[in-house]
Image: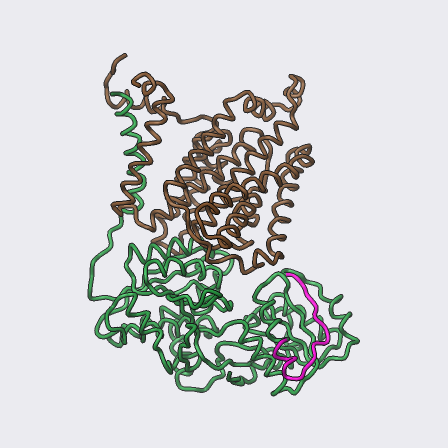
Chain colours: A green, B brown
């Protein structure tokens, strides 16, 4: 008998260990609407996650103050996925199966967001990201992913828009592309820029590549210096782009430099210096120069709560929460399936990052904003529509 | 029958089966829900990784920082196989192919580098893991930096259990064999071991290859359970994470590695309710444990069924059939 007894003791210890981790009880309260927040609050891309969550919390605070959704208050259940996709998957299933949320916001980056989509499909609860821009996030070769949505434009659209901007607004025909070969974001943008630019009658004079964390770009710049071009496109992040711009201007290359939302950081100014940041344009989700009443009110509210200027991630987080709340208010019932249907049928949602509708691929149809930098500060914002 | 069950072997079997059946029952009654199953998967995968790294670092004394690289190979081979042909057979085949590929790379890398010692080996293995990561970053079939998404999930609790116990038993039995003792002799004193006639390079490579094979299996389980992999997941920090589990549990203790893998997963799960300070608390616990138990939770001791036998006697006050 002994053996069995000890084995049972053993097994019990094991079970207790597992039970211990699920001891928290969830309250069954029907008067609130639970929304999950699954963001990168620590790790590599914590700034994206933290900024998004600030925006989300501001929006939810406002909605609750104004009476909630059809009289029900929103409760956010917030977890940190450590910038790890596997953690994001785990937390998505925790939010859906244990906390019983009706929708999950985030994660911010495409990879982590994609990792949560199978869980969403399995539990029939929609996941919505404010900033997952990779092309295959909501749709792939097998068709649209039923429970995945986003409210930001995708990478290929940014590339296309910047090519159109170079051709139509700046009237440039000869471009050089300097891209980050270690980033898919950069490759995607470069490809789409080149395609649209060539279709529009432009030529790509040269394509140069660097890898993340490079600091000296003089070799690349010297090799292109004597070529005949009138615009440079740098689809990369602010860390390298800042240095490229500084070194290019230092070498006397004064043609316009174009970039995408990866430029949007105060670090760009620190690295490049104000003198170099002239004649620089980048596409973005939102600009604080926008004078529409929604944006002005948002900037005012944001400053009142956090005492700083909102950035694009703050704006996207804010829009994300309002957008989901809007869908829930139109849903027939408060469950994943109904909310998903309401999200799909969103038309003309007026957000801080523009007015948009959701298309059949679960992407928003919205304008892109191109920001011009003069002496390092945002000088003007130009809307480029599809 | 009774005799078999009375033997140590029998006790082990009963214990393993009971663990398996109880967890399986809890899963089917949904007490262990999807979320806790994911924690369970993390625990099992970390156990495989930690035990296999312990074989290399704790028992053979070779300081390797390349475990994430082997994991990546297993993960990518299994992921590509199951995406191309989403059937269960292809998952099993992919898992073993991945593990074998990892073992082959381990052999090719181990043969020259294991002649190095200490810091040099650490740097060489670190370099190897980086090379593997950068290769996956630039290949067409691995979809570069964006990674592979939509990997079908074939891993469930029975398979996690089979692979985890399989690997632990394999490594445990290896260590109890004459080969294993040779490895431990190399750790204690390489020159003395060589003087005793042990072919040190052979045994170091053997331990390295078994470790790589196991890490490949862990990678395949990871890919299949968590739907998504990208090269950045298998960077330097992943190797360090595994090393943390091994050192925390005790270098040279299989049960220590298992205990530490379970402990860290539970700690991480507990603190999810405090998202802002979660990683701070996690780090704090590591520091506190390392201050008070610098040799790791178990040092080089093992917990076995006989330890529990003694404990059982202490608690139950029963002499049994002695």
Residue A257 vs residue A381: left or right? right
Compared to residue B304, the image places residue A139 above or below, namely: below
Vertical arrangement, residue B94 with respect to residue B22, above or below: below
Q: Is residue B116 left or right of residue B236?
A: right
Q: Please, which residue is most extreme toward the top here?
A: B322
Magenta span of residues = A195-211
Q: Position of residue A73 (x, y in %)?
A: 25, 69
- Location of residue A125 in the rendering, given as x and y in whole percent from the top left corner: 33, 63
Residue A204 lies in magenta, yes or no?
yes
Residue drawn at (65%, 77%) of the image: A257
- The quadrant of the image that shows the N terminus of chain B is top left
- Residue A228 colored in magenta in the image: no
Q: How many marks?
A: 0
Relative image position of residue B245 (x, y in whole percent): 47, 39
Q: Nearer the viewer, residue A287 or B308?
A: B308
Q: Camera-side residue: A113 or B163?
A: B163
> Is residue A14 left or right of A161 when viewed as pictured?
left
Viewer-closest of B49 and B246 = B49
Question: Which quadrant would the C terminus of chain B be assigned to in this image?
Answer: top left
Residue at (49%, 46%) from the top-left corner?
B220
Q: Can residue B119 be seen at all in this image of the molecule?
A: no
Q: Image quarter for residue A7?
A: top left
Q: Residue at x 76, y 79 (%)?
A: A228
Q: Position of residue A307 (x, y in %)?
A: 42, 72
Whether B205 is drawn above or below A264: the answer is: above
Residue B268 appears in the rendering: yes
């Amino acid at each position: 008998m002994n053996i069995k007894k000890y084995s049972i003791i053993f097994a019990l210890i094991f079970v207790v260990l597992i039970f211990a981790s699920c001891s928290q009880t969830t309250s069954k309260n029907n008067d609130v609407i639970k929304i999950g927040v699954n963001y990168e609050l620590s790790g590599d891309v914590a700034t994206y996650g933290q900024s998004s969550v600030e925006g989300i919390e501001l929006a939810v605070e406002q909605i609750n103050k104004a009476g909630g959704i059809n009289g029900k208050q929103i409760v956010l259940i917030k977890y940190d996925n450590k910038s790890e996709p596997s953690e994001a998957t785990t937390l998505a299933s925790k939010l859906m199966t244990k906390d019983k949320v009706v929708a999950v916001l985030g994660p911010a980056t495409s990879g982590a967001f994609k990792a949560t989509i199978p869980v969403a499909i399995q539990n029939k609860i929609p996941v919505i990201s404010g900033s997952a821009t990779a092309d295959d996030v909501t749709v792939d070769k097998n068709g649209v992913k039923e429970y995945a949505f986003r409210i930001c434009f995708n990478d290929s659209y940014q590339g296309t828009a910047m090519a159109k901007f170079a051709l139509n607004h700046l009237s440039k025909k000869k471009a050089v592309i300097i891209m980050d070969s270690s980033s898919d974001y950069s490759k995607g943008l470069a490809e789409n820029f080149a395609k649209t630019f060539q279709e529009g009658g432009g030529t790509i004079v040269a394509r140069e590549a660097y890898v993340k964390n490079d600091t000296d770009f003089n070799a690349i710049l010297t090799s292109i210096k004597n070529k005949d071009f009138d615009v440079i496109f740098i689809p990369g992040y602010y860390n390298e782009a800042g240095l490229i711009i500084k070194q290019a201007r230092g070498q006397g290359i004064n043609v316009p430099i174009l970039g995408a939302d990866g430029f949007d950081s105060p670090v760009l100014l620190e690295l490049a210096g104000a003198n170099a940041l002239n004649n620089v344009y980048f596409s973005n989700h939102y600009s604080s120069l926008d004078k529409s009443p929604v944006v002005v009110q948002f900037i005012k509210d944001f400053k009142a709560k956090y005492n700083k200027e909102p950035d694009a991630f703050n704006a996207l987080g804010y829009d994300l929460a309002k957008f989901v709340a809007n869908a829930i208010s139109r849903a027939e019932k408060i469950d994943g399936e109904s909310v998903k249907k309401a999200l799909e049928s969103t038309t003309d949602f007026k957000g801080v990052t523009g007015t948009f509708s959701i298309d059949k691929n679960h992407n928003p149809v919205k304008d892109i904003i191109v920001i011009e930098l003069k002496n390092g500060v945002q000088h003007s914002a130009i809307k480029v529509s599809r | 029958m009774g005799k078999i069950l009375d033997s140590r072997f029998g006790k082990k079997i009963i214990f393993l089966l009971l663990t398996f059946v109880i967890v399986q029952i809890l899963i089917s009654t949904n007490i262990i829900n999807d979320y806790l199953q994911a924690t369970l998967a993390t625990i099992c995968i970390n156990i495989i990784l930690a035990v296999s790294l312990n074989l290399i670092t704790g028992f053979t004394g070779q300081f390797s920082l390349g475990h994430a690289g082997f994991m990546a190979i297993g993960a990518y081979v299994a992921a590509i196989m199951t995406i191309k042909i989403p059937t269960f057979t292809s998952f099993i085949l992919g898992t073993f192919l991945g593990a074998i590929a990892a073992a082959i790379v381990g052999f090719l890398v181990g043969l020259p580098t294991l002649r190095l010692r200490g810091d040099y080996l650490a740097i060489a293995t670190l370099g190897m893991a980086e090379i593997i990561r950068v290769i996956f970053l630039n290949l067409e079939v691995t979809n570069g930096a964006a990674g592979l998404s939509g990997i079908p999930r074939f891993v469930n609790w029975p398979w996690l259990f089979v692979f985890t116990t399989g690997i632990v038993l394999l490594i445990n039995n290896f260590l109890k064999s004459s080969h294993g003792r040779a490895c431990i002799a190399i750790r204690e004193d390489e020159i003395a071991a060589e003087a005793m006639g042990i072919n040190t390079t052979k045994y170091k490579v053997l331990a390295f290859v078994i470790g790589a094979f196991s890490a490949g299996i862990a990678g395949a389980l990871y890919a299949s359970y968590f739907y998504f992999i990208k090269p950045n997941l298998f960077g330097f920090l992943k190797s360090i994470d595994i090393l943390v589990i091994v050192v925390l549990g005790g270098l040279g203790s299989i049960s220590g590695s298992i205990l530490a893998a379970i402990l860290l997963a539970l700690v991480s799960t507990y603190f999810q309710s405090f998202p802002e300070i979660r990683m701070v608390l996690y780090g704090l616990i590591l520091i506190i444990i390392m201050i008070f138990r610098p040799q790791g939770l178990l040092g080089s001791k093992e917990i076995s069924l006989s330890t529990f036998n003694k404990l059982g006697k202490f608690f139950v006050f029963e002499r049994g059939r002695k």
